[in-house]
Image (tube, grey):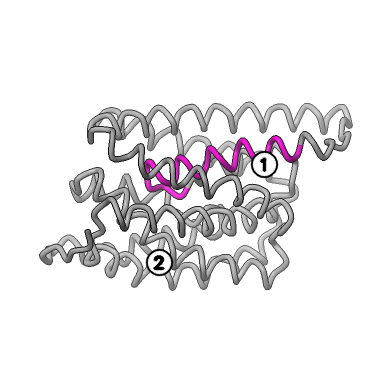
Amino acid sequence: MIFYSSYENIYLILPVIGFIIGLFGTMLGGGGGFFFLPVLTLLLGVPAHTAVATSLAATLPIGMVGSWGHYKKGNIDLKTGWLFAVAGIGGALVGAYLAKLISEQQLKVLFGIYSILIAVNMLVTAVRKKQAEKHKQKKEESKTVRIGKGSFFGLSAGMIAGTFGTSGTAPVIAGLFSMRLPVKLVVGTSLLIVLVNTIFAVGAHFLMGSIDLTLIAFLTSGSVLGAFVGPRLFSKVKLEKSESKVHYLYAFIVAAIGIAMIINR
């Protein structure tokens, strides 16, 4: 069901929040959809199921603009991206169905637990990568292993996108980091994967969920601008010597959001 909620003064800060999410979402990867759900539920008190569908719809413009910007900058590994995306399509459809079977309180708690687990996974991956580089262990993964990883993380991302409305950013980035891609390729490729997952998840929620067009209008008025600026700033950033810091920072943010969702269930 698509509807327009009544205007509230607090909505005036949504374009600013949208700009920040669009900017950093296209610089950190994933389109920022992970952050829309906490903003809608914790800040605005939007019902969880409506927040899921609305956050997905609000992520679409960021994914489109950001993916195109990163593609022009050469920051997308198309082969790896489509491997994740194909598996994610099925996961997105299943996740949207599962979301209707979960209560709002359960949805928040599960999202919090999922966030903390993903943060731990990212920290472990970062430590292992650092140890491997220290001992100069850079052996290539077999094609079978890459397909297995892409399918697993892609399917997980799709299910997360459909269930929580977060675009599945965290498992996508965790999976791409586990494949030892450079940070810039991780960020750009994740946007492409998230875009595909989000398109199918939005379609499923359009049939089964509630989408608030008023909230989407306020959020996207700022997020699209941020998505235009993000790839351009990101192309000028040198990350070779600070990749591990990016891993740790992202893991900390993800874990903090997860804890907040559980506390405010």
User: Residue 223's mark?
Assistant: 2
Percent coordinates x, y for residue 207 in the rendering: 30, 55
**Dominant secondary structure (helix, strand or loop) of the stretch shown in magenta:** helix
The residue lying at 56 percent from left, 53 percent from top is: 28
Q: Mark 2 vs mark 1: which is more N-terminal?
A: 1
Quadrant of the rendering where the C terminus is positioned = top left
Percent coordinates x, y for residue 1 in the rendering: 22, 58
Amino acid residing under circle 1: Gly
- When the figure is inspected, residue 123 is found, relative to residue 55, above or below; the finding is above
Q: How many marks?
A: 2
Which of the pair 153/101 is nearer the observer?
A: 101
Badge 2 marks a residue whose secondary structure is helix
The residue lying at 38 percent from left, 33 percent from top is: 258
Percent coordinates x, y for residue 240 in the rendering: 75, 50
State whether residue 232 appears in this view: no
Percent coordinates x, y for residue 264 in the rendering: 23, 32
Q: Is residue 162 magenta?
A: yes
Amino acid residing under circle 2: Ser
The residue lying at 87 percent from left, 37 percent from top is: 140
User: Residue 183's mark?
Assistant: none
User: Residue 150's mark?
Assistant: 1
Q: Give the range drawn in magenta.
A: 146-167
User: Few, some or many C-alpha atoms within 10 Å of disc 1 (few <14, some 14-19, many ≥20)?
Assistant: many
User: Few, some or many C-alpha atoms within 10 Å of disc 2 (few <14, some 14-19, many ≥20)?
Assistant: many
Which of the pair 249/50 is nearer the observer?
A: 50
The residue lying at 68 percent from left, 49 percent from top is: 83
Give the Cα distance between marks 2 and 1: 28 Å
161 sits left or right of 250 in the view? left
